[in-house]
Image (cartoon, helix red, strand yellow):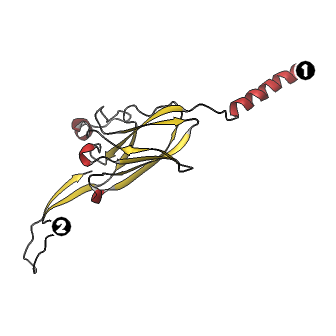
Amino acid sequence: MTTTRVLPALAGAFLTIAVFLPARAEPVPTRLVVRVLSKDAKFIGTTMGGVRITVRDADSGELLAQGTTRGGTGDTQKIMKQDWKRGAPLATPEAAAFTATIALETPRRVEVVATGPIGQPQAAVRASVTHWIVPGRHIDQGDALTLVMPGLALDVLDPPANARIAGIPASVTVRANLVML
C-alpha cells in the first residue's frame, strides 16, 4: 500500500523538477521589427536619414542587434486624417522599420533604444522601451514594436550659419524649414 502512494508522488516530483529546471535549448531565430513614429506625425524613415536602433539585453547590457530604420513615412490618410482604433495597425508594408533576427535560447528582457533622426542631428532625440522577447514568438506583425518620438526638426535656411551681420540692423529676415520628426 505504501509503495503505490510513493510512486505517484515521486513521479509528480520528477515532473515538477523537469518543468522548472532550465534545459539547454537550441537557439531559436526570433524576428523583431522596430518602428519609430513621430509624435502626432508619421513613421521616421529614409527621408529623414532613418533612426538608429539598438537592442540590448536589459540585464547584462549584451548587444543583440543594431541598425537603422528604412522605408517610407506610411499612409498619410490613415495616420493623419482618420481616427485611430485601438489595436488596429497604423503601419503599412512600406512604412519605415528596422528588422532583426535574434537567436534566443530563453526569454529575455531587452531594452530597445531609438536615436534620431540621423539626417537631422541637431533635432535628434532618444526614445526607449524595455520589453520581453520569447524564443520563436516573432514581434513582426502590424505595428510590431513601435516607439514614439516627440520633437521637431528645424533647418535655418537664411541667413547662413557663417553670415556676419554688421552693426545692429533694423530687421533681419530669417527663413527656416520646420517639420515634425
Side of 159 relative to 72 (left or right): left
Q: Position of residue 80 (x, y in %)?
A: 24, 41
User: From the viewer's perspective, is residue 90 above or below residue 68?
Assistant: above
Residue that appears at 56% across and 37% down: 107
Q: Is residue 35 above or below residue 128?
A: above
Amino acid type at mark 1? Thr
Label 2: few (<14), some or many (≥20) within 10 Å? few
Give the number of the disc on residue 18: none
Q: Residue at x 70, y 34 (%)?
A: 21
Q: Residue at x 10, y 80 (%)?
A: 168
Q: Residue furthest right?
A: 1
Q: Quadrant of the N terminus?
A: top right
Q: How many marks?
A: 2
Amino acid of disc 2: Ala
In three-dimensional space, the C-alpha distance between marks 1 and 2, rounded to whole angstroms, equals 89 Å
**Near-viewer residue (120 or 149):** 120
For disc 1, the neighbor class at 10 Å (few under 14, some 14 to 19, many from 20) is few
Disc number at residue 3? Answer: 1
Q: Quadrant of residue 32?
A: top left
Query: Residue under circle 2?
Result: 161
Q: Residue at x 31, y 48 (%)?
A: 39
Dot 1: element: helix
Choose top left, top right, bottom left or bottom right for residue 35. Answer: top left
Q: Which-is-in-front pick, marks 1 and 2?
A: 2
Give residue 37's quadrant in the image. top left
Q: Residue furthest left?
A: 170
Left or right of 139, for residue 108: right
